[in-house]
Image (cartoon, rainbow, N blue to C red):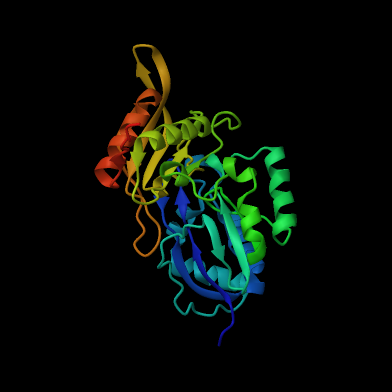
């Protein structure tokens, strides 16, 4: 009947003990009921979830124990009668949002800016706000991949916007490896992280972009520990922080997974290498990108 709403999916998890995609609850809700549904699901987990065994303290374990149909019945007791899902699906690959793209509204555009490894300082945040006020609709949005969108840019302001010096550091069209790189906070600010993911991810992207050409964006996800805030198993290439013993002692290292994807045929990455010292990560990623994702060495033009 043309009413906009959501199909409800539950139970997605990325962790040190279990990785799984969400499953459909066979429930549809209108937009204005999203908070009530969230409250019902979270309330059931709060009241019935595991408290004595920390490794089992994940919602997915509870869902598997009671079953999807059993959980749906409990949600219905709290929320009220549930309308069956008419068929919500994840049937598209995540979109590339970089560059200037037209909005549905005639004459308006959205600018997709690359934020290297999701790192923005106060000055950059203020500059984003300034650009959004001058050129857009005083709004900045942030994506799951840690990048920024400035919507509401009229056609006649696009040329001036693209000439802004800020876009040299936060480009509309980043290079291939950097474009797909996502990183968790890492050991600089997180007590769980075993590695300094953001600095390593940025340095690796810069180094590989100097030597490789990629035919398409490749999602490379870095996370500093098995809790997987960086969603390593969902990346085409995923790196999970660990430690490795070398002749020089214990060093930062990464377990590497391959083949994660989202969309019509989602898959979780599979472990292909364990405890790769950080000094060897660039070479390992270069090999994987060339063997599996069509990367080729850059050609240099003689002067």
Asked whether, in this view, residue 237 is left or right of residue 166, the answer is left
Considering the image in quadrants, where does the C terminus appear?
top left
Camera-side residue: 53 or 122? 122
Which residue lies at the image location 74% right of the left edge and 56% below the top edge? Answer: 134
Whether residue 17 is visible here, answered yes or no, is no
Which residue lies at the image location 49% right of the left edge and 46% below the top edge? Answer: 174
Camera-side residue: 286 or 79? 286
Q: Quadrant of residue 286?
A: top left
The residue most toward the front is 303
Picture layout, residue 254 above or below residue 50: above
Whether residue 276 is visible here, answered yes or no, is yes
Q: Position of residue 119 (x, y in %)?
A: 59, 39
Asked whether, in this view, residue 293 is left or right of residue 200, the answer is left
Q: Position of residue 121 (x, y in %)?
A: 67, 37
Which residue lies at the image location 38% right of the left edge and 48% below the top edge? Answer: 218
Camera-side residue: 245 or 47? 245
Asked whether, in this view, residue 85 is left or right of residue 255, the answer is right
Considering the image in quadrants, where does the N terminus appear?
bottom right
Q: Position of residue 2 (x, y in %)?
A: 56, 84
How many numbered markers are drawn? Answer: 0
The residue most toward the bottom is 1
The residue most toward the top is 248
Q: Position of residue 104 (x, y in %)?
A: 58, 73
């Amino acid at each position: 009947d043309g009413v906009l709403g959501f199909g409800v999916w539950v139970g997605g998890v990325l962790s040190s003990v279990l990785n799984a995609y969400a499953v459909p609850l066979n429930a549809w809700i209108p937009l204005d009921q999203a908070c009530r549904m969230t409250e019902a699901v979270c309330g059931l987990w709060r009241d019935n979830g595991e408290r004595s065994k920390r490794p089992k303290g994940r919602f997915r374990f509870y869902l598997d124990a009671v079953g999807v149909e059993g959980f749906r019945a409990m949600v219905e007791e709290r929320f009220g009668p549930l309308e069956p899902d008419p068929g919500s699906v994840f049937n598209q690959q995540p979109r590339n949002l970089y560059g200037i793209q037209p909005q549905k509204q005639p004459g308006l555009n959205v600018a997709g800016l690359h934020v290297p490894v999701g790192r923005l300082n106060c000055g950059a945040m203020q500059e984003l706000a300034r650009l959004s006020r001058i050129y857009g609709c005083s709004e900045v949005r942030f994506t799951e991949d840690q990048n920024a969108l400035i919507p509401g840019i009229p056609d006649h302001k696009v040329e001036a916007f693209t000439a802004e010096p800020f876009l040299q550091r936060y480009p509309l069209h980043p290079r291939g490896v950097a474009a797909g790189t996502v990183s968790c906070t890492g050991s600089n600010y997180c007590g769980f992280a075993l590695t300094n993911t953001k600095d390593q991810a940025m340095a690796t992207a810069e180094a590989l972009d100097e030597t490789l050409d990629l035919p398409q964006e490749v999602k490379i996800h870095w996370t500093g520990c098995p809790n997987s805030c960086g969603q390593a198993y969902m990346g085409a290439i995923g790196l999970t922080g660990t430690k490795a013993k070398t002749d020089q002692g214990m060093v930062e290292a990464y377990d590497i997974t391959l083949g994660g994807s989202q969309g019509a045929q989602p898959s979780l990455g599979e472990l292909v290498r364990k405890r790769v010292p950080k000094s060897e990560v660039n070479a390992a990623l270069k090999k994987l990108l060339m063997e599996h994702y069509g990367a080729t060495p850059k050609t240099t033009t003689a002067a």
